[in-house]
Each structure stands twice: as C-alpha cells, then as structure tokens.
Amino acid sequence: MNKIFEQMRAAQPQFFSAADIAISVAMADEISELIAAIESVITLPAFQSRVLAQAPEIARRPTAALGVFYGYDFHLSDSGPRLIEINTNAGGGLLNAYLLAAHGKEDEGARLLNEFVAMFREEWMLERGDLPLTRIAIVDENPAGQFLAPEFELFRQLFAANGIEALVADPGEFRAIGNQLMHAGKPVDMIYNRLTDFSLDATVNAEIRAIFEVGGVVVTPHPRAHALYADKRNLMLLSDEAALIELGVPEATRQIVLKGVPRTLAVHPEDAGHFWSERKRWFFKPPAGFGSRAAYRGDKLTKRVFEEILHGGYIAQEVVPPSEHSVVVDAQPQTMKADIRAYVYQARVQLLAARLYQGQTTNFRTPGGGFAPVFVE
C-alpha cells in the first residue's frame, strides 16, 4: 500500500473510519438507476439551453471532455436513495481506492487505479485524439495547504507510474505563452482541476483561463461541467415535474428523477414568512457552494443568518435525514450519520464510498468517522 496513504492515515486518523458500510443490491441499483436518469436529462438540449442561459459565459464554451470525478452525494432513506447534491471536482476518489485495499480489497483497489488513469486518458482523447498525453498539472490554490494535499501527491505518483509526467501546482505558477500554458518553462497538456473557482474568474486563474479559452490546454473538470451538473439551482429543475415535462423528459425517467431528487426551491425575500415558518423542513444552500460551506439546516437558523439567506440567491432543499450506523470506537458503539458518495464517469458508478460523521454536516473531525468503504451485499 502507498506510503503517503499510510502516513495520512497515521497523521489524520479522523479522516478514515475503521468501519465499513453495507448496502443492499437493490439500494445500489437504485443509485445507479437514478444517476443514469439524471445524466439522460442533463444531455437534453432543452435542459442545457435552460441551464447555460444563467451560467457564466465561459461555461458556454463547447468542450468535448466530459469531466472527471463527478460526485453524486446521497442520503439513504427507507424508500430509497435521495440525491443531496452533485459535485464536479469531488475529492477523495483516489484515497478511497487505497482505503479499499486497507480493508482487504487489494484487487478492487488496483482495478480502480487503472480505471482512473484510463479516465484521464479518455478525457485527453476526446479533446486531442491520438496525440500523446505528456504532462498533467494537478491544480489548486496553495495546494500544500489544502486538507486533501496528500491526495494530490498520490495522483502525481499514479500518473508518473503510468508514463505521464505530473506536477502539483498553484494556479499562480503558470504562464501563458502564445497558445500554450507553461509551468517552469515546460508546456502543460492537461489541468486536473481541483479549484473551487468554478468559472476561473479569479485573477490568479487568468493564465489558465486565457489558454483554456483558446483551446490550448485541456481542463477537467471544466466550467461547463460545473454549470450543467453542480450548480445547485439545477436541482430545482430536476425536482419539478412541470419543468421536466416542458423539457421533454420521458415519463419513466421523470418518475425515477422525481422520486430521487428532494423538492428544491429558490429562496426569494417575498417568501420569507413561508420559509421561516416551515424552516425545519428545509436545508438552505448557496447555488455555487461546496463542502457544506455557508449551508444551513433550517432548524438551526438564527434570524440574522436567515436574513442573509433571503438576499443571497439561496436554494432550499427538503430535508432528507442521513442514514445512521453503529460504529465501534475505542471498544464502544457510537451512532454515526452517513453520506454516500458515488464517484461517476460517463454516467457509470466507479466507486461508492461513505463519509461518517456526527453533527450537522460531514466534518472529518468525528472520532471514528471519516471516509469508509461501501460494500454491496
């Protein structure tokens, strides 16, 4: 097993749970069916036209690459999985491949490593055909200071072991020269994008953006992927039967999507009375949020925060409580909540993983919590 992964487990024991989660074949099948249904809706020209009309201009740029590591996050209810959100730069995929090996599934972990490399090669082929993929940059702001910094290094090693030169870099380290993106005097073919500036608007990302806009570098995941999949306003369309009918979604697909996506509404100041009186029913999120930042459970709201939500372009999603699981910590049983993440490429689930926690949202601070493998039984 990789030394960096083992060092991370030792240094941050709260990041990986010793537990594992079992789900039924039926639940796993429902997750896959719901993902396939949602992706079929997202491919519809009418859906894309509606969504991209409200997206930043850079998201309207045609892009052949699909985007790596989509993360579909679910809560599991008695009547099936419920989609909480979709992320387009979901972290933890590689860590969870190594975690499978730590739980005795070495062959499965090794298979995933090969599949992940093949996924990046596929992204490159979609954009560049048979040209060789030579150099990948794994990019985030101040990467060494990021919580998932060890995963960046694991990716660098994985690419290098498969004949692809790789580096980990801050966006400020790149220079645009002609139509090429350069780092330390050498051209970069592909950016593995871990930035949370989804539209590349920040000044520090200007060099990357300039070359991406002229087609000089492949970026995955890219701004268009975020607009189509991860903008939380899209959940309003996916949970609205009238909107789905208008978009031309077939009835069978509509029923799958409507069952799996909790009702989601825009929050407007004129609806303050309604949302405040029924706040316990709702979870409030900013449309471009990530990692539970600035997201609030209605039953925990103060009036001050609620006023900010009313004028902040928020959405409100019906609360679906996470499933609860008994986990042994220091020889004592503890009850943990679980978010289930499906890592997805080309509408297919590559890996299921859980994040176990106590409190309002996933936090990677709960003793005995953290990432846990999900096994289908």
Image: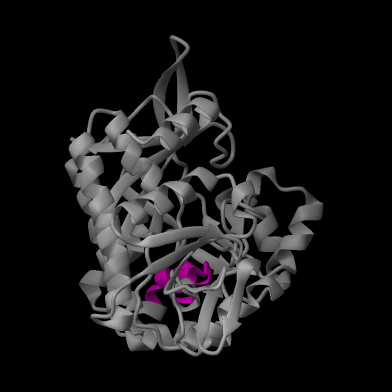
Q: Looking at the picture, tell me which residue is in the foreground, 270 or 216.
A: 216
Quarter of the C terminus within the rendering: top left
Q: Is 5 above or below relative to 347?
A: above
User: Does residue 338 sit above or below 229 in this rendering?
Assistant: above
Q: Residue at x 28, y 56 (%)?
A: 162
Whether residue 34 is visible to the viewer of this picture, yes or no, is no
Along the viewing direction, whichever of 6 and 161 lies nearer the viewer:
161
Report x, y in % for residue 351: 29, 49
- Is residue 137 visible in the rendered image? The answer is yes
- Measuring 35% from the left and 56% from the top, which residue is drawn there? 159
Q: Residue furthest right?
A: 304
Q: Split into 4 quadrants, where in the image is the N terminus? A: top left
Nearest to the observer: residue 121 or residue 321: 121
Residue drawn where x is 47% and y is 42% of the image: 321
Residue depicted at x 36% and y 42%: 96
Main SS class of the magenta portion in the image: helix
Give the x, y percent position of residue 78: 32, 41
Most foreground residue, 292 or 138: 138
In the rendering, at what x and y percent does residue 293 appear? 64, 53
Residue 113 placement, left or right of 317: left
Q: Position of residue 257 (x, y in %)?
A: 32, 65
Q: Is residue 53 above or below residue 111?
A: below
Q: Residue most toward the top?
A: 331
State the scheme by which the image is colored: one colour
Is residue 231 covered in magenta?
A: yes
Residue bounds of the magenta highlight: 227-242
Question: Residue 302: within the magenta?
Answer: no
Q: Is residue 297 rendered to the left or right of residue 230?
A: right
Q: Is residue 182 left or right of residue 111?
A: right
